[in-house]
Image (cartoon, rainbow, N blue to C red):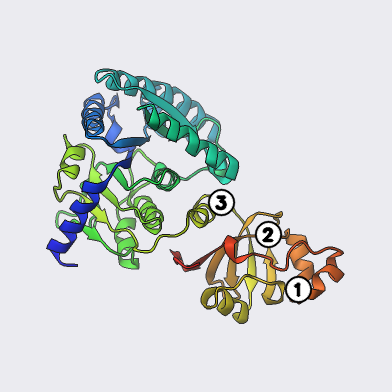
């Protein structure tokens, strides 16, 4: 893409944004002796200025664990879960108090929301979270969201707040995700150790080359690193949402972005958007098992818009119930789709390879012809989400 075309597109996106999710990383919010209060003040000032221009802003803030580590004067990050959760509870209290203090200067109210993946896996709780956030925005409150590290277990973790911020952007129909970190954006190499590293200003497609560049830039206090930010960009791009990675340590960075400066790395969204329900299936659900399909079923799913029938199933892996999310793979392990099953693993094992007319005879009942209905399938190639019906 030509430089001028990209800049015009980028500026047009920022010009039209009315609702934005801003993720602030641990490397931005913390310093040697605790929270970096000067940086917090700078970011909060920018947020309040942008709100005066009519923007609705949702913050996804890291920093609880890092803050707790500093407050407890620990020399390293805790290794076991109880210690991590205890440190998070100490740090989260300090974090939200400082946010409230910063926002009070501008007579701006805030609200704290702590989430686990379980909250978004449940369709009802997913919608409840959406309704709560919409109400807060209607009341002119700035929601400050963090993962609920004090109670979450490993299998229900988002993994990092980069993923959480992407899911919140999708949940709330945001028009932009801004990821503030402690370097200027995505580089071709780690700029902290490679003086010749070059900033990648625009990403049109998250290719293997982009992923390799991201893997070379690890995180510090946080759990993310650059790869998790690129994976967050992959999530929002399928929802038609652009994302920018920028340096949150630089004063006025948010205002500079909205004034059209070419700072950070800008990720262009896909032109076709994945339907909201399919985004929910693809990105919020915990994968419970694998259904291995034959070549005919793979072709029907990928290229003919068909559901998964029992006749195309070769094998079942894992234990799961009705409504669980599973991977659909070819027998060579290639991932082709993620979907919600209409039958549990034991029933699928009994009916695999059968025609739909034989299901009732084998099980004694037949609730559905399809093991996974097309409406509950999200197509994939490798890690790339395909925007198809």
Q: Residues within 10 Å of mark 1 (few under 14, many from 20)?
A: some
Q: Which residue is mark 3?
A: 285
User: Spatial distance from mark 3 to mark 2, Cα to Cα?
Assistant: 16 Å
How much space separates mark 1 and mark 3, taking CA atoms?
27 Å
Is 205 positioned to the left or the right of 114 in the image?
left
Residue at x 44%, y 60% (from the top left corner): 274
Tell me where residue 385 sits by quadrant: bottom left
Q: Secondary structure at mark 3?
A: loop
Q: Is residue 51 above or below residue 284?
A: above
**On the picture, is 41 further left or further right than 237?**
left
Per the image, the residue denoted by label 2 is 318
Q: Is residue 59 above or below residue 167?
A: above
Residue 356 numbered tag = 1
Discs 2, 1 touching: Cβ within 8 Å: no
Pointer 2 or 1: first along the chain: 2
Q: In the rendered structure, which disc, 1 or 3, sits on the residue that comes first in sequence?
A: 3
Viewed as shown, does residue 11 lie left or right of 72?
Answer: left
Horizontally, residue 216 falls left or right of residue 223, namely left
Residue 72 location (% of width, % of height):
40, 22
* Relative height, residue 270 to residue 96 (above, below): below
**Residue at 59%, 41% in the rendered image:** 124
Q: Are marks 3 and 2 in contact (CB under 8 Å)?
A: no
Front disc: 3 or 2: 3
Is label 2 or label 1 in front?
1
Mark closer to the observer (1, 3): 1
* Residue 132 visible in this rendered orientation of the protein: yes
Q: Give the Cα distance between marks 2 and 1.
A: 23 Å
């Amino acid at each position: 893409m030509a430089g001028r075309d990209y800049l015009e597109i980028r500026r047009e996106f920022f010009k039209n944004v009315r609702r934005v999710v801003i993720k602030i990383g641990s490397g931005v919010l913390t310093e040697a002796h605790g929270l970096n209060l000067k940086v917090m003040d700078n970011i909060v000032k920018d947020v309040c200025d942008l709100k005066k221009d009519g923007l609705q802003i949702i913050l996804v803030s890291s920093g609880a664990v890092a803050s707790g580590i500093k407050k407890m004067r620990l020399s390293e990050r805790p290794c076991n879960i109880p210690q991590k959760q205890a440190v998070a509870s100490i740090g989260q209290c300090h974090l939200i108090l400082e946010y409230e203090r910063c926002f009070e200067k501008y007579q701006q109210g805030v609200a704290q929301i702590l989430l686990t993946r379980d909250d978004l896996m449940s369709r009802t709780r997913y919608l409840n979270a959406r309704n709560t956030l919409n109400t807060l925005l209607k009341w002119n409150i700035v929601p400050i969201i963090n993962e609920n590290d004090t109670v979450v277990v490993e299998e229900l973790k988002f993994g990092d707040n980069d993923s959480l911020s992407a899911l919140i952007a999708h949940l709330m129909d945001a028009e932009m995700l801004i990821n503030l970190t402690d370097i200027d954006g995505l580089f071709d190499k780690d700029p902290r150790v490679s003086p010749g590293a070059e900033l990648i200003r625009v990403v049109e497609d998250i290719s293997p080359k982009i992923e390799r560049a991201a893997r070379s830039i690890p995180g510090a206090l946080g759990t993310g690193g650059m790869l998790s930010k690129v994976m967050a960009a992959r999530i929002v791009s399928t929802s038609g949402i652009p994302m920018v990675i920028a340096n949150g340590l630089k004063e006025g960075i948010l205002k500079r972005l909205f004034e059209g400066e070419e700072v950070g790395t800008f990720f262009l969204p896909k032109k076709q958007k994945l339907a909201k329900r399919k985004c929910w299936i693809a990105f919020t659900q915990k994968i419970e098992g694998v259904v291995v399909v034959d070549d005919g079923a793979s072709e029907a799913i990928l290229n003919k818009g068909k559901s998964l029938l029992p006749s195309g199933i070769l094998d079942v892996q894992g234990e799961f119930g009705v409504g669980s999310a599973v991977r659909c793979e070819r027998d060579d392990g290639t991932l082709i789709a993620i979907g919600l099953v209409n039958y549990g693993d034991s029933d699928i094992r009994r009916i695999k390879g059968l025609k739909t007319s034989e299901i009732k005879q084998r099980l004694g009942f037949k609730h559905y012809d399809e093991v996974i209905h097309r409406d509950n399938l999200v197509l994939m190639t490798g890690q790339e989400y395909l925007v198809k019906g």
